[in-house]
Image: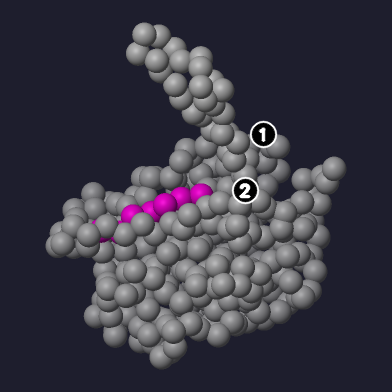
Amino acid sequence: MRTRKQILGLILASLTLTGPALSQATEEPAEKSWYPSKYGPDDRKGAMNNLSAEATINAAKLVRSGKTYALGVVTGPATPAYPPRSYSATILQSNDGEGGAMGANKVTAHDDIIHSWVGIGTQIDGFAHLGINHRYYNGVKGSVFYTPAGVTQFGTENIIPTATRGILLDMAKYYGKAQLDPGTAFNRKEIDAAAKAAGVTIGKGDVILFHTGWLTKATSDPQGYIAQQPGLGVEGAEYLASLDVVMVGADTAALEAIPFEDPTKPFIVHQTLLAKHGVHVLESINTAELAKDGATEFMFVLGQPRFKGAVQMVINPIAIR
């Protein structure tokens, strides 16, 4: 049976693909300027500090038609996932299907047990998911909060319920393609241009979603969907964090561009958003219908399952416009 360290290594290796091996060094990071957080050395909320009642009220004003969009994909056995992540379900029946009904009103029932990694399908990354040389958001060492039974800090059950403005930046439209090429990295220039084309100004407390057209590969080419993808570049991640957004997501499995902009720096966009700035990462977001409808801003709502001590979580955010 594989150890937890071996399993994590498999996941990271599969994400990195043909790139260089990740460092296993345990020395202190040379650069410490990214912590403490601007929200204070004891902060654990990160950019979620930028949510406000006013932002929620303003987001509600964006609702005109009342149309709702499920931004989560269906998660099942065929959902593309980084090895060894998988999903299966066991459905239990209260009887043999014929007899054993309970009471005069003959109650029968089914129950279920889900056997699944929670970093599969549409998901949110918590701050404990990915760090920089064993330090995570606000410079907290992994050894302080890690236990095999669940993290004691940064668990996704603590993510604040979110109802704020969502912005869709249609990068496929910006580049004039139905589906962006793998490795295409968009940064500040492209973000600003796409926002201008959408007629929106990114602001404090916003959730930013990118449409690249890549999600269609999840069914047509599941391995290809995972192996490479277009996505956010590190400069773009720094830029969005500077605008005080609370979450950034895309219709891709890793948000950032793979192959990586710098092959020697895998997952630096995750490090930038999660560890350095406390901005949650959203992956495999179903943006297709929003893009089809030409939606640029909407009310974004998320109340994730509150599984204690989890570092990621399968989610189904809702857009309302």
Q: Can residue 65 be seen in this view?
A: yes
Element marked by disc 2: strand
Residue 83's spot in the image, x, y percent?
A: 71, 58
Residue found at the very far right of the displayed protein: 1
Q: Does residue 60 appear to the left or right of 179 in the view shown?
A: left
Residue 25's spot in the image, x, y percent?
A: 81, 60
Residue 87 marker: 2
Residue found at the very far bottom of the displayed protein: 176
Under mark 2, the amino acid is Tyr
Location of the N terminus by quadrant is: top right
The residue carrying pointer 2 sits among few (fewer than 14), some (14 to 19) or many (20 or more) residues within 10 Å by Cα, namely: some
Under mark 1, the amino acid is Ala
Kindly identify the residue that appears in the image at 46 percent across and 77 percent down: 213
Q: Give the range drawn in magenta.
A: 314-320
Kindly identify the residue that appears in the image at 33 percent across and 55 percent down: 318
Q: Is residue 192 visible?
A: no
Question: Looking at this view, is 284 or 266 the one in front?
Answer: 284
Q: Does residue 204 appear to the left or right of 1 in the view shown?
A: left
The answer to which of marks 1 and 2 sits earlier in the sequence is 2
Residue at label 1?
149
Element marked by disc 1: loop
Kindly identify the residue that appears in the image at 42 percent across and 52 percent down: 316
Q: Does residue 78 appear to the left or right of 52 in the view shown?
A: right
Residue 181 marker: none
Image height of 289 relative to 230, above or below: above
